[in-house]
Image: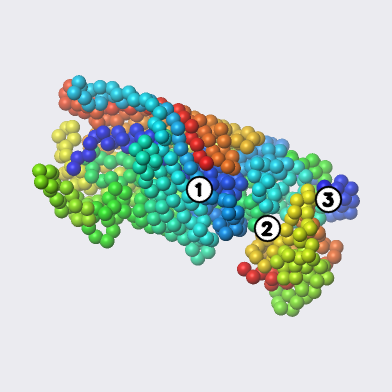
Amino acid sequence: MKRPLQAVIALLVIVAASRAEAFPAFARKYGMSCSACHVGWPVFNQQGQNFRDNGYQFGLSKDDPVALSQDYLPVSLRTTVFYQFTRMTNQPSDQGPIVTQVGGVPLPPGVDVLTGGVLAKDVSFLLVLTGFGPDGTSVVESAWARLDNLGGTGWLNVKVGKFELDLPASAHRNVTFTTGYAVYGAHPEGSVVAFDMGENQVGVEIDGHSARSTTRYALAITSANGGEGLSKGGWSTPMLYGHVEHVIEIPSRVLPWVQLGAFGGVGWWPTSFNTITPAGGTPTNIAGTGTNLKAFYRAGPQLNFMLGYPATPLLIRAAYVHGWEDAGLASGTDATGFDLSTASNSFDGGFGELDWIPFSESSYNATPWMFFGRYDVVRFKHGAGDVDGGTIGVRRYLAIGPRASAAIHVEGHIDRTKGVGAAGPDGVPLVVQAQSVLAGFDLDF
Amino acid sequence: MIRTSVVTRAVLVFAVGAVASSDGATPPDPTAAERGRRVFNRYCISCHGVDGDGRGPTADWIDPRPRILTSGTFKFRSTPSGALPTDADLYRTITNGLHHTFMPRWAPTTEMERRDVIQFVKTLSPRFKEDPQLEPIAIPPPPPFTPELVQKGQGVWKRLQCAACHGDTGKGDGPSAPTLRDDWGFPITPRDFTRGPLKVGDTPEDLFRTFLTGLNGSPMPSYADTVSNDDAWALVSYVRSLRKE
């Protein structure tokens, strides 16, 4: 099965995807500003990370829902109303390579509905429904329960359900709307593997952390997303994933905070299926019959650090990912005629991101500005799809207080993806350049 | 109504001047305070207000109400009744948070931020420039907690009439409890010793310190002049025996 080349583009030019999990209901519960837990909403700071690691608990006898006013509802809603213009070059058409230009305001915008928190001491949960967009569909983005502080220690917690892997930079608290982290969803040309690190996975996670979350680890066994129910056996498309990170604090106003980490996951994807062929149709794989599992992995280091004062930092996050997929996990040929099914393929990629909170104000909208930028890169050993992408933007927070959050969000993005466009005069697929501008309101209550 | 009046403070300063630090006042470090303002803006103003007046947007619905930092009146200190807290006291409160309140533990923030915001907090009240910095009270090592000590502590409990506020069983339901107000006139609830830790901590030393320093701005007085250290440890022992959960 050969994946359409345009699918690679779709990994990049997505709109407002994976943007849930910013939760003003917690601010209302504890009377704290969003800026207490977010470097700049929605990116966590260490206080927010520690609160999450502790199972949405501060541990000061105000967590248990029994102790709360019955007026409190642990529900948040988030939507983004925006205008977006996207221009893409070298799109195939009957008239040859063309440029498409699309602009508009999607109405109704998608909505994220979030509920989560503490069911009882050391039992936490999160449920996120997202969608409700123009097509009317919604999906359960997250649904998990977690047993926290097992044995009285933060080093042992168990989470079960559908959750985000513990990534070097959360795809669900990503500040950009036009694109996600390209390397999370990267696949070699022709790959049948649907796994995307940035998508939530179904499985079990064991995780732990030090008292201040300066040292953290997570180990997960999941069914790689997109492969649930495909393979035959006790655990479909199994995947093992791990992440460890450690913070070094330096009494410096230049470089006060450095976080080092490493992550990696290995999974197995079926390549042989029983099929069924409808009359006059083509053979279709039967789910649950997949065998002949082939391995793939993603692994790499991360480096996050702050420049400047930590309350108004320039947060820099970088990660490198090496991906590898075994021979047999891809099909078809590349533009040079190379049979992609005969050899393993790999890629190298990563991102570097800057999130800058230039100052704070003595007001209830204490951190009113956030400037951000990111560079994404992916390079494949064989085949098309090499990506270079850049995104810059600014968020002007209209509210980031203890009730709700609102921001004006302006963002521009440009990327180039090699070999995925319409065929050129020599028959070789051209480079596609995508440009996108987005401006709108990000609203979270 | 500010119970800790200027006159009271003057008397206090005179009375305890002999134990004051030779360094006198520890006014805020202006450079660190300026950095600390950024920390305060980000983390603190939603409760404590933009000027530290305790009138942040959430102040009206959280109980107990946030500290009015402009008053220079702090409950949780190691210093004698009426005195200012030390930097270490403020650091402890900010780092560990306060149980049964909406003051979370800010330990995950960097050490530098916590130390800087202390300096900023000290700019919010003129007391930190005017009043002497007193030394923390001495806390002797605790004796072994024995049934005899608990029994002795029960006697101290009765003698000091703790039950008037905290109730016969320590549940915070004494006959005076409904009438209690803090220095700003807001209702205040005596600690329920049967449940969970004190706001400031759960060690015997935390209880001992509270008995001897009192809680400024609240009806909880200091017993430094009323009980001996031995009696105070006995009272600690008895109060800890009241814990049901």
Q: Is residue A370 visible?
A: no
In the rendered image, the vertical position of residue A56 relative to residue A360, given as above or below? below
Q: Is residue B225 visible?
A: yes
Label 3 secondary element: loop
Quadrant of res A10 = top left
**Which chain letter goes with mark 3?**
B
Choose between A61 and B76: the one closer to the eye. Answer: A61
**Which chain letter goes with mark 1?**
A
Residue A420, x across and y down, in percent: 25, 31
Q: Are marks 3 and 1 in contact (CB under 8 Å)?
A: no
Q: Is residue B146 left or right of residue A44?
A: right
Q: Which tag, 2 or 3, sits closer to the chain's start?
A: 3
In the rendered image, the vertical position of residue A300 relative to residue B172, given as above or below? above
**What amino acid is at disc 2?**
Lys
Choose between A380 and A178: the one closer to the eye. Answer: A178
Residue beneath disc 3:
B3
Q: Residue at x 67, y 67 (%)?
A: B194
